Image: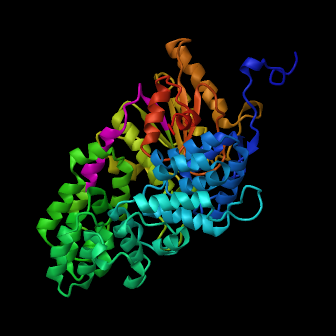
Amino acid sequence: MANKSLFASMLGRLPKANAVNEAGGLAYKLEPKHALAQVAATGTFGNAFYSTAETQLDEVLKLIDEVDDNQYLAKLTLYAREKAFMKDMPAALLVALSVRDTELMHCVFDRVVDNGRVLRTVFQMIRSGQFKNKAGQGRIGLSSSVQRAFQRWLNTASVGKLLSASIGNDPSLRDILRMARPTPKDNARRAMFGWLTDKSIDKWAPATEADLPVEVQSLIAYRNSESEEAQALIAGGLDNVRWDLLSDAAKGPTVWAALARKMGPQALRMNLNTLQRHDVLATSAMVDYVADRIADESEIRRSKQFPYQYFAAYLNADDNVPQKIKTALQKAAEIACGNVPELPGPVVIGLDTSGSMSSAVTGHRGRGATSKMRCIDVAALFAAAILRRNPDSVVIPFDTSAYDAKMDPNDSILSIAERLAKYGGGGTDCSLPLVAANQKHAKRKFAGIVLVSDNESWVGTGRHGSTGVMTAWEAFVANQRKLVGKEASPKLVNIDLQPYQTVQACERADIMNIGGFSDSVFNVISAFLADNNQRFVAEVDAIEL
């Protein structure tokens, strides 16, 4: 009899792995459009466990060159900003697009550059010399087309937006104004530009100091105030000026309390330690105010916040932040679970708890700038959120072993996430949760399997040169069809939290690889499991320009 493995039918043969991942394991290489989407939804230009910031930039530039589709590049730029909520990556894609297609660049510029921070980031990237010009040689400068985009932004931005853009240096808004050289549309804007660039008033002509917008005049008065009470009074009336533009000159707790009341719920959540440091939380009245704003159910529903935001604030809260506020963060996380869609059936959730998952989810960015939120924390929160909305699901943490995690879906979501994050720490074998599902849950019906990982599996291999995940997935599908019948169509969803370009399961009708950790990922998963075939690249292509 001939070798059955060698001469197996093509129908039963598993796809052979065609790449090696960063950890040295067998993997499948993503096609360029998908790989670029993966990086755009997860890349932060910070040092990850298996890559450096420099490596990420090199890979992004190579992938952009490989994707010969400017419409797709423009849509991905918008997806990275509007759906994945990234900051630096959409700026990089926009700079690349400015060389490839200036018309498309203008089409998406204002949607991508939706605040002053992104404007400064785009300017910084252009000035860095990292991006090549049309000829592929030399660096991109501030071309006339890009200059017009900057000029339009500067002349149409509201006073509040311009003031917000003035926060930060290297580059500063003054640097941008001096390089972009916008022609002011009226004397108010002429005076504004003169003030922002520190020009002497006589050089504003024909504009004068009286032409400065009311907000700017009030800001000047605030900064010149000699007493805490006078500052607090002015701060309370500055409706269109962001609180962080006032913070550097704040004279005491009374002013900081006024600034806290100017903050929205998300700003309060992100600045709890700052408020604690400035004695804002020393009174029960302010503690009640902050706690109530953070856990405002209508606001959380309206803004569609994801539990991740509250978990991050909970992890980062100083020990001295009042317990009532920490309890409000937990309550807010519970409410935010309602924003996670219910899946069409229970799923097996494979949670990677290997050593590489202990790295910061946004990469190492130096002391004081590196997030305390690790990949494992995000993965655990994903698992907890899915379990909360789909309580019949099963969570299987894994590294080089699969762990038996008995979780009560009725526990608080932060408690579940904290418990899950304590598992593992060894190597990585992404096939283990599938193997465990086949062995321990063989008699249960599932809509599919969701793997949350950094995809750096290096332990174990599969049949016919495939990965272990593909081999175990075939067994899972076969078992589900024994239980349900041939009509069973379980799906495998692989959520990748890091900007690498290989996966453990190849793309096909029943398998989807998706990158990122924003709330939009849940909607894509739900649609895919419900046979909507909403693929990751298709999700990008669906963006309207």
Q: What residue is rendered at 43% in x and 61% in y?
A: 155
In the rendering, at what x and y percent does residue 423 appear?
48, 51
Residue 264 lies in what quarter of the image? bottom left
Residue at 70%, 65% (x, y): give it.
139
Q: Farthest right residue?
A: 2
Q: Which residues are magenta?
A: 329-349
Between residues 60 and 442, which one lies in front from this camera angle? 60
Name above or below for residue 207 compared with residue 460: below
Residue, far left: 285
Question: Foreground: 327 or 77?
Answer: 77
- Residue found 41% across the figure and 25% down from its top: 344
User: Residue 165 placed where, x, y %?
Assistant: 41, 67
Position of residue 227 relative to residue 84, above or below, is below
Quarter of the N terminus within the rendering: top right
Q: Is residue 529 above or below residue 383?
A: above
Residue 232, position as x, y percentages in the image: 17, 76
Is 513 one of the magenta-colored residues? no
> Is residue 266 toward the left or the right of residue 190 in the image?
left
| Image position, residue 400 (x, y; %) | 60, 47
Q: Please say if 127 is above or below 531.
A: below
